[in-house]
């Protein structure tokens, strides 16, 4: 460390003398002058030395060192990195000390390098110190037992040692030695150098020194104490402590005496109180009473505290609240319709609102006791006529996992289905067992699938009963949908996917009444007016696809289309969005029924479905379509045809009066329709509804303001100008005049990143260079030691050889001498 | 019927020794070559017989037995002719695909090669046996083999295996065969009835490839060793090909054949003929198919494409092109499968900025009128298309924005009154029945249809339609992004969406799903009952 440091400083100081100072004149001269000015050359104040003490001299020495360092800095152009100050031209402002910083860096590197070297080949790898982990002779149990005992032992050991208040062995909490950095603190403590009552400066000083000694790092003492001083201190201290001890001894003695005196008094008092209590022998009755009292108190504590009940609202208030809620819901609906999507909180709140009191107001729900608990806020409430049965929790019913399982459960007549469904829901309320929530969620989907399934069955025998079953199932599904929206939506999405695949593979033959039921149910359950809706939008697309792609060449298909149009129009009853496919279907179907030569443009799929000219429309023909008849249309061809025709006309009326009339292209949309209506009237003059419809259209057209659009009535756009901008007070030092804040930030960040990167690269290079240097040094050292060793060996050998040779020579001489 | 071994021995005898006394066996062998159900059972024998006969006649050719003028040569030639006619019979009558048929074609072609050498006027004189080839063409054309593959149905191109063998092995690779084929086929066309759909299918099979001798970069070989000079004459070949093409396309064509022809027209036909404009009649016919056949589908469009190419490259003066194009835009187009292709073509037809604004306005108006009962896929392609047209023809912007009808609060009462009366008296002058797009007066109309689409049920379509009420800042839309939308892709986009926010529920309560409106309780859907 110092080997590196010293030469560097030497060269730096050498350079100081060779380079000229900023102040002008010769460097040497300047140096001399400065030294003289600071009284550093020649005999510095020889008189002072005699009179002053060592202490003062030491102080002087320190100051002197500082002054010299300052001068050194001043004279070395490399010690200080200077920058020209902006104010004065001549003045230099120091900004850094490259030498020192380099030295620091070097030292740091050295430290890291040494640490690395010390740890080389010693670190990494995990030593498994768990007991018995490697041993094969121990069973798992034995190992565990052994570990447990060891752990216990070690714990008890540590407890015994320290901080164990119950321990009797060492009454001193600090019985164990406290250390600091491995050095015993006891000496310090005994000396009592807390420094509380020692105003003396010297005492504090000495303690500080002791502390610093304990760090094990010799620090340069700014001022040395004389021996006399030290001795004085020690004497003063010992005296002080002695006094202290005596004082405390006295105090203790006093206290003991005091306690001895008061002991008798206390004892007598205690005895008297005991005598008083004894005669009150509690009899059994009172004990019981107390017990009872206690229990009452307990009960009262456990009892819920009475809370002020809500004021009974008047009917008007209830009505008003209801209205307000409806208004709010309506507003939310309108927002969604125009695409303003509420944040999740808002929406969730809406749903919460729904089941807070929207359902709570149901008067049928006034159950008692168990029922009330069972129907508490966590689950869905059902309107149940069969209260008696539902009151008992039903345990012997399982929650079906899929529709097939459910089908196995409902083997009885259809009218029983809602009851069974209700039973299942009651039995699996979420708060009754964990996992019930998921089960009921799944079950919601099953109810939906079951409704679709039922509608596909043959039920023509008993339509009203069937309808009531479906409606009550709808009621259940509707109330379930609030809690189990997510699983229900998932099921809907699955059904949509299935339907799409079915249609792709088998076209119309893949569809059934169940699909119509599904679309209707979606309309019932979900808000169809939203601008975008995860369930309704795909449904709308699917309906439109069916209307556009099915070849309507049979009565069955036309009926299917007619119902689809109904559903689709019902979806749009509030949002009033335009569906081109509905228009397409209406025109096509009407043209199909006409089968007129004039209707060739309407892309009619068949000409066999024309309504015969003899059809009498004067009598009442129901325009309502019966789903169960739609797919069994073989028997009553003509009647069904007529009612489908009327139904489609009715749909057209709905479309015209609710949706089309609001569109700016109303006239254009009606062009074909009017033509068809005229044809219809020509063919069937007795058809009243066609006349009415035509009149309505014409009336609406009259009131519709139809004039050219002006959609582009925007504020005129400014032409972007690219004239150069003149910057007043332009400053080249300013990095950028970019007005964009973010871009500025980004550029700044980029610059910083570049700088950091550069710096890091530099550091890395320095490190590697340093390491290389270290390595070279080490190699040199190794080589030198090797050579030295070899030289020594050679030396010894040659010495030995020489000695032997001398001996030999001597011997030889001796022998020859003898001769 | 000779047995396998008998054939073998007599063939060996005939080919090895020059003894003319054995020649009677040739007649025996040739007569044995009879094809009927019975003999076909042993097809390998027949095949062997045919090959043996080829070897025998080859030998006889090399011996000069067929060339000299003596009685024996006469007799030999007769036997040879019988052999040829037997081969042709096999080719023209075999009802199913057999190896024998294919062998026969190959052997017949080898005979042609032999003939060209030995039947030349003198030795080394250039000669091509064109009559022999003509017989082969005749036989091939009357071959009844049909493949049941759907490919043939779709393209209208014959997949007769014998013809494929001939085309693949000989027609495609030899220049002289191509020349003589065309010249002989031309002869046949002029003298016989070849205007059936089947014949057209075979014709297409013959020429629908890229190795015609007039193709650049195609270097064909010569089949016969010394053909006449005329096969080098490219111009004559072109004339013949052109004649054949025109004769063929004026015959009977199925829809698929129309389509195939139109598809290959400007790659495989027009470069090989002299005057492409002669195809105008054919193209017009193809275009007119629309009025005859509703299922014509893409054919009129392709025909227009062909006409457009001719106009663009060969200066064809074709009147009423745009009127015809306008006529193709019908309600059916919006629901048809080939809609995307039509839009791509229409994009090129209407790309010019020099078209009259009235014409463009008519196209815009008609397209937007048709969106009123179009599926979303079609609407999605119409909207950017119209946008691009409007951007290219800013004078049509008046259909979206007519400043004369704007009121603003700073107007004087008279002005307000004026605008009011303008609005009140406005009658849409657009005539959607007018076939001429220059005269529809679409310019004076307005695009209410597109404005109404902002109320479309599909949120994305509605949003897209809103571009017409926003400033026209975008240069143009890339049509390719909008052309291929269908219900399937729309639904796929929906189903792939993740259920992040729960779908909102209906807060209204319905007592009944279906039912009459006047029954008690609220009903969701009236007019339908269980």
Image (cartoon, rainbow, N blue to C red):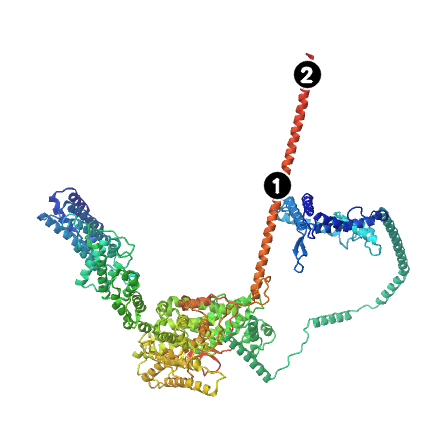
Q: Mark 2 — on which chain does it sit? A: A
Does label 1 or label 2 sit earlier along the sequence? 1
Relative horizontal placement of residue A610, taking residue A389 as reference (left or right): left
Q: Is residue A452 above or below residue B180?
A: below
The residue tagged 2 is A813
Residue A113 in the image, given as x and y percentages of width and height: 64, 46
The one of A284 and A620 positioned closer to us in this rendering = A620
The residue tagged 1 is A776
The one of B127 and A79 positioned closer to us in this rendering = A79
Residue shown at 48% from the left, 80% from the top: B522
Relative horizontal placement of residue A617, taking residue B242 as reference (left or right): right
Is residue A211 at all visible to an observer of this figure? no
Q: Is residue A568 above or below residue B259?
A: below
- Quadrant of residue B36 within the rendered picture: bottom left
Q: CA distance from mark 1 to mark 2?
A: 53 Å
Split into 4 quadrants, where in the image is the N terminus of chain A?
top right
Residue B235 in the image, given as x and y percentages of width and height: 23, 58
Is residue A528 at all visible to an observer of this figure? yes
Q: Secondary structure at mark 1?
A: helix
Residue A627's tag is none
The one of B451 and B25 positioned closer to us in this rendering = B451
Q: Residue furthest front?
A: A25
Residue B170 in the image, given as x and y percentages of width and height: 24, 53
Q: Mark 1 — on which chain does it sit? A: A
Mark 1 crowdedness (10 Å alpha carbons): few <14, some 14-19, many ≥20: few
Establish whether labels 1 and 2 are both on one chain. yes
Relative horizontal placement of residue A161, taking residue B20 as reference (left or right): right
């Amino acid at each position: 460390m110092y080997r590196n440091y010293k030469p560097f400083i030497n060269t730096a100081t050498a350079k100081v003398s060779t380079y000229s100072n900023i102040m002008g004149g010769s460097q040497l001269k300047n140096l001399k002058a400065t030294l003289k000015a600071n009284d550093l050359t020649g005999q510095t104040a020889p008189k002072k030395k005699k009179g002053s003490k060592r202490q003062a001299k030491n102080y002087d020495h320190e100051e002197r060192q500082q002054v010299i360092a300052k001068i050194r800095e001043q004279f070395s152009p490399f010690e200080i990195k200077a920058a020209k100050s902006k104010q004065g031209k001549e003045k230099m402002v120091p900004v850094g000390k490259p030498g020192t910083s380099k030295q620091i860096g070097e030292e740091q590197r050295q430290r890291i390098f040494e640490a690395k070297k010390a740890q080389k080949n010693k670190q990494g790898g995990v030593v498994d110190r768990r007991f018995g982990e490697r041993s094969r002779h121990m069973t798992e149990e034995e190992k565990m037992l052994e570990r447990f005992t060891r752990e216990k032992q070690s714990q008890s050991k540590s407890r015994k040692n320290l901080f164990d208040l119950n321990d009797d062995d060492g009454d001193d909490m600090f019985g164990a030695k406290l250390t600091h950095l491995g050095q015993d603190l006891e000496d310090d403590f005994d000396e009592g150098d807390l420094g509380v009552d020692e105003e003396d400066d010297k005492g504090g000083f000495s303690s500080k020194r002791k502390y610093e000694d304990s760090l094990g790092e010799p620090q340069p003492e700014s001022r040395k104490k004389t021996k006399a001083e030290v001795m004085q201190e020690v004497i003063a201290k010992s005296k002080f402590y002695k006094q202290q001890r005596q004082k405390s001894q006295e105090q203790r003695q006093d206290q003991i005496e005091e306690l001895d005196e008061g002991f008798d008094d206390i004892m007598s008092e205690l005895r008297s109180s005991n005598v008083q209590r004894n005669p009150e022998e509690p009899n059994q009755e009172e004990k019981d009473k107390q017990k009872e009292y206690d229990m009452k108190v307990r009960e009262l504590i456990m009892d819920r505290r009475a809370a002020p009940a809500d004021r009974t609202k008047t009917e008007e208030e209830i009505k008003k609240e209801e209205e307000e809620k409806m208004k709010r819901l309506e507003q939310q609906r309108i927002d969604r319709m125009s695409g303003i999507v509420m944040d999740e909180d808002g929406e969730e709140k809406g749903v919460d609102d729904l089941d807070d009191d929207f359902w709570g107001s149901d008067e049928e729900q006034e159950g008692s006791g168990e029922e009330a608990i069972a129907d508490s806020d966590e689950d869905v409430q059902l309107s149940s006529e069969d209260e008696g049965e539902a009151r008992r929790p039903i345990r012997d019913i399982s929650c079906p996992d899929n529709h097939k399982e459910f089908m196995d459960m409902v083997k009885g007549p259809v009218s029983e289905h809602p009851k069974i469904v209700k039973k299942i829901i009651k039995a699996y309320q979420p708060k009754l067992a964990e996992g019930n929530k998921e089960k009921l969620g799944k079950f919601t989907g099953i109810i939906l699938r079951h409704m679709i399934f039922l509608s596909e069955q043959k039920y023509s025998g008993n339509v009203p009963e069937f309808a009531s079953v479906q409606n009550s199932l709808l009621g259940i599904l509707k109330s379930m949908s609030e809690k189990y929206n997510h699983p229900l939506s998932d099921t809907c999405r699955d059904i949509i996917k299935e339907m799409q695949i079915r249609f792709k593979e088998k076209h119309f033959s893949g569809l059934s009444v169940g699909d119509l039921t599904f679309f209707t149910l979606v309309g019932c359950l979900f808000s169809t007016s939203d601008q975008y809706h995860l369930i309704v939008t795909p449904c709308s697309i699917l309906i439109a696809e069916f209307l556009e792609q099915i070849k309507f060449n049979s009565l069955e298909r036309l009926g299917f289309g007619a119902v689809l149009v109904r559903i689709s129009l019902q979806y749009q009853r509030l949002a009033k969005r335009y569906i081109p496919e509905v228009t397409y279907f209406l025109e096509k179907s009407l043209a199909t029924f006409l089968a007129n030569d004039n209707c060739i443009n309407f892309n009619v799929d068949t000409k066999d479905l024309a309504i015969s000219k003899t059809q009498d429309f004067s009598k009442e023909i129901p325009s309502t379509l019966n789903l169960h008849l739609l797919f069994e249309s073989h028997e009553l061809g003509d009647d069904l045809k007529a009612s489908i025709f009327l139904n489609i006309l009715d749909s057209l009326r709905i479309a015209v009066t609710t949706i089309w009339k609001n569109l700016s292209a109303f006239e254009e949309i009606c062009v074909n329709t009017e033509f068809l209506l005229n044809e219809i009237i020509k063919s069937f003059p007795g058809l009243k509804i066609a006349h009415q419809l035509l009149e309505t259209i014409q009336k609406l057209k009259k009131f519709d303001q139809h004039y050219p659009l002006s959609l582009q009535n925007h504020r005129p756009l400014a032409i972007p100008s690219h004239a150069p901008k003149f910057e007043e007070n332009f400053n080249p030092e300013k990095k950028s005049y970019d007005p964009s804040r973010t871009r500025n930030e980004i550029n700044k960040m980029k610059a910083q990143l570049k700088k950091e990167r550069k710096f890091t690269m530099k550091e890395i290079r320095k490190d590697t260079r340093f390491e290389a240097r270290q390595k070279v040094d080490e190699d040199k050292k190794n080589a030198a030691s090797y050579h030295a060793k070899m030289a020594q060996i050679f030396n010894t050998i040659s010495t030995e050889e020489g000695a032997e040779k001398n001996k030999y020579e001597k011997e030889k001489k001796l022998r020859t001498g003898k001769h | 019927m000779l047995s396998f071994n008998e054939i073998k021995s007599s063939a060996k005898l005939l080919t090895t020794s020059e003894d003319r006394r054995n020649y009677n066996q040739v007649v025996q062998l040739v007569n044995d070559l009879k094809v009927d159900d019975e003999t076909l059972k042993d097809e390998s024998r027949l095949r062997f017989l045919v090959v043996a006969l080829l070897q025998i006649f080859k030998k006889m050719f090399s011996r000069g037995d067929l060339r000299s003028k003596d009685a024996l040569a006469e007799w030999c030639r007769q036997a040879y002719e019988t052999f040829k006619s037997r081969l042709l019979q096999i080719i023209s009558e075999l009802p199913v695909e057999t190896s024998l048929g294919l062998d026969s074609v190959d052997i017949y072609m080898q005979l042609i090669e032999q003939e060209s050498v030995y039947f030349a006027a003198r030795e080394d004189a250039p000669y091509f046996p064109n009559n022999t080839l003509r017989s082969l063409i005749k036989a091939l054309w009357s071959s009844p083999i049909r493949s049941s593959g759907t490919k043939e149905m779709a393209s209208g191109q014959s997949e007769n295996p014998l013809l494929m063998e001939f085309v693949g092995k000989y027609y495609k690779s030899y220049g002289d065969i191509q020349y003589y084929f065309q010249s002989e086929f031309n002869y046949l066309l002029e003298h016989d009835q070849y205007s059936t759909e089947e014949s057209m299918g075979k014709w297409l099979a013959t020429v629908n490839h890229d190795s015609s001798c007039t193709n650049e970069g195609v270097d064909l070989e010569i089949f016969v060793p010394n053909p006449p000079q005329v096969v080098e004459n490219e111009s004559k070949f072109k004339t013949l090909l052109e004649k054949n093409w025109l004769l063929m396309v004026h015959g009977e064509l199925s829809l698929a054949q129309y389509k195939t022809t139109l598809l290959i027209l400007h790659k495989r036909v027009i470069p090989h003929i002299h005057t492409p404009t002669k195809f105008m009649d054919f193209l017009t016919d193809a275009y007119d198919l629309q009025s005859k056949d509703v299922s014509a589908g893409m054919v009129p469009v392709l025909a227009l494409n062909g006409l457009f190419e001719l106009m663009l490259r060969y200066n064809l003066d074709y009147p009423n092109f745009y009127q015809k194009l306008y006529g193709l835009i019908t309600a059916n187009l919006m629901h048809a499968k080939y809609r995307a292709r039509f839009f791509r073509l229409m994009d090129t037809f209407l790309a010019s900025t020099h078209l009259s604004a009235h014409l463009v306005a008519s196209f815009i108006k008609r397209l937007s009128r048709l969106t009123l009962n179009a599926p979303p896929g079609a609407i999605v392609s119409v909207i950017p298309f119209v946008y691009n047209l409007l951007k290219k023809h800013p004078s049509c912007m008046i259909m979206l924005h007519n400043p004369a009808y704007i009121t603003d609060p700073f107007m004087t009462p008279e002005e307000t009154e004026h605008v009011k009366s303008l609005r009140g008296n406005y009658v849409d002058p657009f005539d959607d029945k007018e076939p001429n797009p220059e005269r529809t007066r679409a310019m004076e109309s307005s695009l209410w249809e597109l404005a109404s689409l902002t109320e479309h049920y599909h949120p994305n379509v509605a949003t897209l339609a809103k571009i017409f009420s926003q400033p026209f800042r975008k240069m143009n839309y890339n049509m390719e992004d909008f052309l291929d939308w269908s219900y399937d892709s729309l639904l796929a986009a929906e189903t792939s969406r993740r259920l992040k926010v729960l779908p909102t529920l209906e807060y209204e309560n319905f007592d009944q799903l279906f039912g009459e409106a006047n029954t008690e309780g609220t009903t969701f859907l009236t007019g339908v009952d269980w």
